[in-house]
Amino acid sequence: MGKASEIIVGIIAGLVVWFVLWLFFALFSWIPLIGWIIGILGIFIVPMGAGYVAGKVGGVGAAVALAFIAPVSGAIIGFYAINLIPIAFLRQILGTAWGFIVGVWVIFNLIFVGVGGAIGSAARPKPQKPVKVEVQVGEKSTSVPNVEGTSKPVIAEPEMETRSGELVWTKEGRLLEIDVLKKRVLGYLLAYKKAELKTLASKFNVSKAQIEEIIFELIADGKIKGVIDPETETFHVKE
């Protein structure tokens, strides 16, 4: 089923094709014998062709709607014309006959417009399925879906590996060089002497685990001394 706008456009396109095809077959219907054969073929080809176009443009919904439009509009016009007949008995007979004709017309249209609509709907371009690509992050391999359905590279959020020259994925969606981030964290700790890990993480838009790893590396490199209070999760700088 297509969207509402697609269904409407599909119905309009189907009606246009219906009219054009009927006009085409009508041009040959006056020819004896050959025209009759062409006219009989047109009875089947016209609804199927219109249904195909409606289904291809607007989906099955447009084709089903188109199958009802012609009989219903014809029924309304026919019943209105029959009601103009002054003889009640004749109105009743013709009204019953016209109702039967319209019923058969609807069934006929549903079959042939439906077949054409199903073929047209099947010919509609299908949305591409997401393609999975393999992305290498450090020594880890992460499979991530590419939502655009293409095979262009996708950057996955890296595991916590804070080596020199690496890039860190911040919470703002930016890549920041680890050496730059370590200098900023070091400067902050030396200036304030203590800081909660969650405060540091919020300050530099990274995770608490990344902040812990950076502090551990700063201590290991001898650039700062201190301890982390496990209860308050606060880092205290020691002189």
Image (cartoon, rainbow, N blue to C red):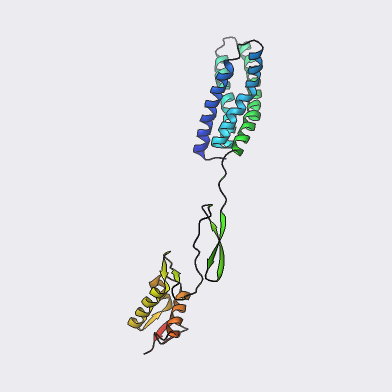
Q: Quadrant of residue 43?
A: top right
* Residue for point 51% across, 38% down: 4
Q: Is residue 90 above or below residue 130?
A: above
Q: Quadrant of the C terminus?
A: bottom left
The answer to which of 32 and 81 lies nearer the viewer is 32
89 or 44: which is nearer to us? 44
198, above or below 24, in the image = below
In percent of width and height, residue 101 lies at 65, 20
- At x 34%, y 79%, the residue is 187
Seen from the viewer's position, the closer of residues 160 and 106 is 160
For the image, the number of numbered tags is: 0
Of residues 31 and 95, the one nearer the viewer is 31
Residue at the left extreme of this rendering = 191
Indicate the position of residue 144 as horizontal and vertical percent values: 55, 61
Q: Position of residue 52 (x, y in %)?
A: 59, 32
> Residue 116: in sight, yes or no?
yes
Decide if residue 233 is in sight here: no
Q: Where in the figure is residue 165, as x and y percent of width and height?
A: 43, 73
Return the residue found at the far bottom: 239
Q: Quadrant of the N terminus?
A: top right
Left or right: 182 with respect to 16? left
Q: Is residue 221 left or right of residue 117?
A: left
